[in-house]
Image (tube, rainbow, N blue to C red):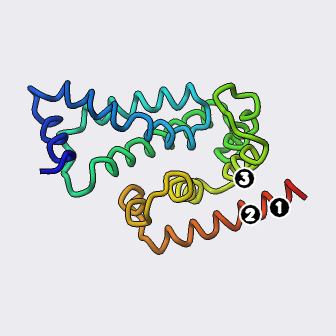
């Protein structure tokens, strides 16, 4: 029996759920945090979304059908929670979602939790210009080093569509970086 199967069984068992959930958090919180952080940009927002993600995982673990990997399922929840958060925040501020992403990217240099250099800031600003789907695919492929079949499972999109999204994202990022560094 693999460790993941045992963990899922323990999560679904009311007697072992709490202890198993602590294991789940310790194993996955950092990876999920950085995935969320790439979407919401701001550290405090990422913490809030991560907490909401774990609450949702805890409440819905019984619904996990084990057809996918546990991490893929959690990643999908984290992605959806992040997108919902961004959409809600943009709506509250009464700005377009792409304008909101630009605003977030422009705050990176003053963010005490961002330790990147100038080229990393330019890269993040380039990523912020991408349409949502391309931004998600690029982050998952480039930063998280997920395989297309894993991304397909998380985003529930065909591998072919993901490859096209990634290709277009890379081209747009390259063009953006060229205009910023010339």
CA separation in Å, label 2 and label 3: 8 Å
Whether tag 1 and tag 2 are in contact, CB under 8 A, the answer is: yes
Residue 13 in the image: x percent, y percent?
10, 33
Q: Which quarter of the picture shows residue 114?
A: top right
Query: Which of 125/147 is in front?
Result: 147
Which mark is on residue 174?
Answer: 2
Mark 1, Cα crowd under 10 Å, few <14 / some 14-19 / many 20+, is: few
The residue singled out by tag 3 in the image is: 126
Residue ID at (28%, 34%)? 24
Q: Which of label 3 and label 1 is nearer to you?
A: 1
Residue ID at (50%, 54%)? 140
CA separation in Å, label 3 and label 1: 10 Å
The residue singled out by tag 1 in the image is: 178
Residue ID at (75%, 41%)? 117
Query: Which of 142/173 is in front?
Result: 142
Whether tag 3 and tag 1 are in contact, CB under 8 A, the answer is: no
Q: Is residue 114 above or below residue 178?
A: above
Which mark is on residue 26?
Answer: none
SS at circle 3: helix
Residue ID at (29%, 36%)? 57
Mark 3, Cα crowd under 10 Å, few <14 / some 14-19 / many 20+, is: many
Q: How many marks?
A: 3
Query: Which of 48/180 is in front?
Result: 180
CA separation in Å, label 1 and label 2: 6 Å
Question: In the current view of this chain or complex, which residue is farthest to the right?
Answer: 182
SS at circle 1: helix
Indicate the quadrant containing the C terminus: top left, top right, bottom left or bottom right: bottom right
Residue 33 in the image: x percent, y percent?
47, 36
Q: Which quarter of the picture shows residue 40?
A: top right
Q: Is residue 19 above or below residue 102?
A: above
Mark 2, Cα crowd under 10 Å, few <14 / some 14-19 / many 20+, is: some
């Amino acid at each position: 029996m693999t460790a993941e199967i045992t963990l899922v069984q323990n999560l679904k068992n009311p007697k072992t759920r709490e202890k198993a959930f602590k294991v789940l958090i310790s194993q996955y919180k950092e990876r999920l945090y950085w995935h969320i952080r790439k979407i919401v940009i701001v550290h405090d927002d990422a913490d809030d979304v991560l907490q909401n993600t774990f609450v949702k995982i805890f409440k819905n673990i019984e619904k996990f059908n084990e057809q996918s990997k546990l991490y893929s399922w959690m990643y999908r929840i984290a992605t959806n929670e992040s997108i919902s958060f961004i959409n809600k925040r943009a709506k509250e501020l009464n700005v377009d979602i792409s304008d909101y992403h630009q605003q977030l990217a422009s705050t990176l240099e003053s963010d005490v939790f961002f330790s990147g250099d100038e080229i990393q800031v330019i890269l993040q600003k380039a990523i912020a210009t991408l349409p949502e789907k391309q931004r998600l695919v690029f982050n998952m492929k480039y930063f998280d080093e997920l395989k297309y079949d894993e991304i397909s499972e998380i985003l529930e999109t065909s591998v072919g569509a993901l490859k096209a999204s990634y290709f277009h994202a890379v081209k747009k990022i390259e063009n953006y970086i060229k205009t910023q560094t010339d």
